[in-house]
């Protein structure tokens, strides 16, 4: 469910009861409940994606084939000059200045598998959700396409569960990434969880 600004109302953090911090009703939900709610949201997102046509942007990073829902892609553009970020994990390729703003640029394949894509980016895909932005490097130009409701298959499973579903293309699976889960993974990797 979305609020008036188009934000996912279910993904919003729980707010304390009316009494505010320190009041009797303002206690955090138990961890098991939070995990259960997150799993339910993921299942609901997967089922929603399977029940409707969705436009995606499909791209590669080295040997990895990925896609993002088009609504989460702010724009694509040539890779700008990047500034290295000292002491950052290897999957953070740098920071780039884009139209007056700074964006963190990542090697998605290295983030997800630990294996660097090994390719310099030709295009930069700007992912935006929940007021956050990041750039994903791709050595190829992305493809835009519509995925019919019946074309969805089960998402690749793994330790880094960032997929909302998958589609079969060119003889293999293309994982469709949930941008909110991608940002959760990045926060966890950087210790911001």
Image: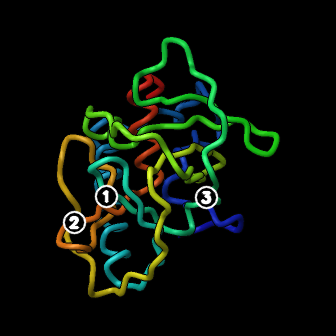
**In the rendering, which numbered label is found on residue 65?**
1
In screen coordinates, is 45 left or right of 161?
right
Q: Quadrant of residue 135?
A: top right
Q: Could you say where residue 112 lies in the image, as x and y percent from the top left?
A: 30, 40
At numbered mark 2, what does the secondary structure look like: helix, strand or loop? strand
Q: Is residue 138 above or below residue 151?
A: above
Residue toward you, 115 or 149: 115
Secondary structure beneath dot 1 equals: strand
Residue, disc 2? 173
| Quadrant of the rendering where the C terminus is positioned | top left
Q: Disc 3 on helix, strand or loop?
A: strand
In the rendered image, the residue lying farthest to the right is 100
For marks 1 and 3, the one nearer the N-term is 1
What residue is rendered at 40% in x and 85% in y?
52
Q: Earlier in the sequence, mark 2 or mark 3?
A: 3
C-beta proximity under 8 Å, tags 1 and 2:
yes
Q: Quadrant of residue 3?
A: bottom right
Q: Is residue 12 above or below residue 86?
A: below
- Mark 3 crowdedness (10 Å alpha carbons): few <14, some 14-19, many ≥20: some
Q: Earlier in the sequence, mark 1 or mark 2?
A: 1
Q: CA distance from mark 1 to mark 2?
A: 8 Å
The image position of residue 17, as x and y in percent, is: 58, 42
Question: Within 10 angstroms of label 1, few (less than 14), some, or many (20 or more) residues?
Answer: some
Residue 122, image x, y percentages: 52, 50
Residue at point 48%, 64% (across, down): 142
Give the left or right position of residue 74, taking residue 47 as reference: right
| Residue depicted at x 46% and y 40% | 120
- Residue 128's x, y, as percent? 60, 53
- Side of 181 where 8 appears, left or right: right
Residue carrying label 3: 76
Q: Is residue 75 left or right of residue 47?
A: right
Q: Who is closer to the viewer here, 10 or 181?
A: 181
């Amino acid at each position: 469910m979305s609020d008036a600004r188009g934000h996912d109302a279910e993904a919003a953090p729980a707010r304390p009861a009316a009494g505010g911090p320190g009041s009797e009703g303002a206690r955090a939900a138990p961890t098991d409940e939070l995990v259960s709610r997150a799993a339910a949201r993921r299942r609901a997102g997967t089922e929603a994606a399977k029940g409707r046509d969705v436009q995606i942007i499909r791209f590669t990073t080295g040997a990895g084939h990925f896609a993002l829902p088009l609504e989460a892609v702010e724009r694509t553009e040539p890779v700008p000059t990047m500034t290295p970020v000292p002491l950052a994990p290897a999957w953070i390729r740098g920071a780039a200045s884009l139209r007056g703003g700074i964006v963190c640029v990542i090697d998605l394949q290295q983030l997800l598998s630990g294996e660097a894509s090994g390719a310099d980016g030709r295009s930069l895909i700007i992912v935006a959700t929940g007021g956050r932005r990041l750039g994903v490097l791709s050595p190829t130009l992305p493809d835009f396409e519509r995925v019919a409701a019946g074309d969805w298959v089960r998402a690749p499973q793994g330790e880094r569960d960032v997929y909302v579903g998958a589609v079969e293309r060119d003889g293999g699976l293309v994982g469709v990434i949930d941008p909110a889960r991608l940002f959760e993974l990045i926060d966890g990797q950087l210790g911001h969880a």
